[in-house]
Each structure stands twice: as structure tokens, then as C-alpha cells.
Amino acid sequence: MSIFRAVIAIILITFPVSVAAQTLTLAEKTETTSPSVSNSLRGKHGIELSIGLLSEISASSEVSAGNVTTKSEANGLMGSIAYNYWLENDLAINVLVGLLDVDATSTVDGSDTFVEFSSVSPMLFGVKFQPFGQAVSDVLRPYFSASVGPYFGHSSNVRTGVNTETESYTETALGSRFGAGADLSLSRLFTLGVGLGYHLVNDFNKRIGAKKNYSSPDFSLSLGIVFGRGKQ
């Protein structure tokens, strides 16, 4: 967790400094340029890469008489990639694909070996609304987001010994994500953002990894690339 705390500390330090610098720069150009026009996102496209800062990665090994269990797991949002298209300067539609959970377990019990792997990946379709887009000369753009879509849970296991048994299945659970955050315009092409959200997911019919339900909060850091001519 020390790495995540360091990242969060860096964000908290750089965000206000960058906002101040960008605001001063735009303030100097106010007499000759209209920020609301020059920085308009209407008609533009964007790719956004995010990493989860609440995720936990752990590995453990347990040894007992005739039994060895090794387990590696990553809980919480690992990361995601999203595509945005701005219908208006303050409203975008998007599609997001991410990785929410990964779990791998290996157990050796005498002559038997059991290996299990599972993962949960959402594919969400939604909207991103920035009601205060003009509040800080388009430099700092707070937003609210809402999306819905399938969460794909995959589980596979192999048991070897006298006989070899394999099982693999994929399930889909409907879920949604609600979030809020802010995007900081580093330039006309790049944005830096932070966001806090919550995944509300229905139960899977079967256990995926250690559980059936993957409703959970997430806190992420994102880097965006904006391209396209845009529209007035």
C-alpha cells in the first residue's frame, strides 16, 4: 500500500500546482482568445487509460502435512481503457473495458494437484456529464458519470492425479457504475484525471474465484488523449 500512498500524495501535490499554472496562462490569453471556443470538446474523440488505486495485490503460501497451497490475487479495479465521444462540450458518451479482479490458486495434496484461475471484466456503456465545464476556464472540468453493461466472470480449474479433470465456464452478470471526478487539461491533447466510483453488480450464478458478488468502490488515476477537429 506504500506505493499507492505515494501516488496519491503526488496527485495531491501536482493537481493544485497544475491548475494554478494553467489558470494563470489562460487568464493572460483571455483578452484575445475565448477559452470556451478554443477548448470546446464538441465533436472530439478521446482515449482514456486508467489505473485503480484502491486495488490490492497479494500472494500467500500455506504448507501443512502433505499439503501446499499457493495463492495470488488482485482485488479491486486493476485498470481500464475507455473511448469517449463528446456530443456537446459538457456531455460525452463512452464505452469502457476493464479488469476488476484476478485470482489464481494452486494446491498440491499428496499426488493430487488442483489449479484454479478466475477473472472478472466489465464492458460498460454510459455517459460523462461535466456541468461545470466552464468554471475554471475549461482547465479543470468536474464530472459525473453513469454506465451500465455486462460483467464477464471467467473461471477455469484443472485437477490432476490418478485422473485429470478440467472445468471452465464463463458467466455474465448485469451491473452498473456511478462515479464522479475531475479532469485537468494539461494541453489541447492531454488530460489528467482522478475519479471515484462504485460498481453495483448482480450476483453470478456460480462462484467466480472466491465469491459471487463483485460490487465494490474504485478510485482511479487516468491519462486521456483528445483528438479530432471538434465542432463549434
Image (cartoon, grey):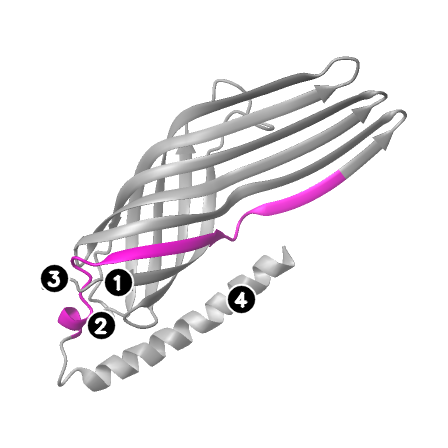
Q: Amino acid at mark 2?
A: Ser
**Region of the chain picked out in magenta, as a range:** 35-60
Query: Where is mark 1, residue-wise?
Result: 227
How packed is label 3: few (under 14 Cα within 10 Å), some, or many (20 or more)? some
Inter-mark Cα distance, 3 to 2: 18 Å
Q: CA distance from mark 4 to mark 3?
A: 37 Å
- Secondary structure at badge 3 equals loop
Quarter of image, res 164: top right
Badge number at residue 113:
none
Q: What residue sits right under mark 2 in the picture?
A: 137
Say which amino acid is labelled 1: Phe
Q: State yes or no: discs 3 and 2 in contact (Cβ < 8 Å).
A: no
Left or right of 177? Residue 3 is: right
Give amino acid for label 3: Lys
Q: Is residue 69 above or below residue 133?
A: above
Quarter where residue 18 is shown: bottom left
Mark found first going from the N terminus, 3 or 2:
2
What element does badge 2 sit on? loop
